Amino acid sequence: AQTVTQSQPEMSVQEAETVTLSCTYDTSENNYYLFWYKQPPSRQMILVIRQEAYKQQNATENRFSVNFQKAAKSFSLKISDSQLGDTAMYFCAFIPYFGNEKLTFGTGTRLTIIP
Amino acid sequence: GAGVSQSPRYKVAKRGQDVALRCDPISGHVSLFWYQQALGQGPEFLTYFQNEAQLDKSGLPSDRFFAERPEGSVSTLKIQRTQQEDSAVYLCASSDDRGSEAFFGQGTRLTVV
């Protein structure tokens, strides 16, 4: 079974600053996918960024990038030039390459961007 | 529509009442998932369909929970004899391939009183 741990229940940062959200996971699988999802107050989960474990290059999507450390089982999210619209819950999630396709989520980090 | 649609968005049920929650996934998406999200927590897996086949229902908390997807598109999650501990947001998601983006609906917030 896989587990995902997010050790920062809440974070806040000034607008335009950079913030890093932490995520660690535990699995015996060698190949898998990792995701960061954003959940604003509207409740709809929105994909922020996706990483395939067999790719060594860290994924980047505009202001969002990850630091994927496979040996350490760490998958942190960096948000650069933070904006008020980034205020939301952020969830780290895992899918194995084989077997059940279900997402295993962490408990989330509530991020507040301060104007 | 272009996204995953769930209805109703809010449901208040008296304890002991049966409820049915509907999910309309993105057209053509093979995989459909139901998750339960308690207040302040991450979503927890309930069940998974590939087309009309329910491949995994290991997350359903009790035999009061039942899900179906008879024609491989729309899915219904039914909860019989609701209890207070069933109060949560129920999220539906669909995807077209393993490892690709799962698209979520806005969820149904169920409150059992």
Image (cartoon, coloured by chain):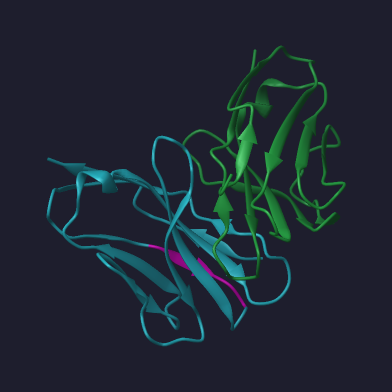
- Relative to residue A95, is residue A92 drawn left or right? left
Vertical order, B108 against A4 (above or below) = above
Vertical order, B6 against B11 (above or below) = below
What chain is colored green? B
What chain is colored cyan? A
Picture quarter containing residue B110?
A: top right
Vertical order, B83 against A27 (above or below) = above
- Relative to residue B54, is residue A37 drawn left or right? left
Q: Residue at x 67, y 21 (%)?
A: B84
Range shown magenta: A23-28
Q: Residue at x 45, y 81 (%)?
A: A70
Which quadrant, please, contains the C terminus of chain B? top right
> What percent of the width, then of the height, locates residue B30?
73, 61
Residue A66 appears in view: no
Picture quarter containing residue B88?
A: top right
> What percent of the width, then of the height, locates residue A101?
68, 65
Which is more toward the observer, B77 or B8? Answer: B8
Which quadrant, please, contains the N terminus of chain B? top right
Q: Across the whole image, how many numbered discs are drawn on residues?
A: 0
> What percent of the width, then of the height, locates residue B55?
83, 59
- Relative to residue A82, is residue A41 drawn left or right? right
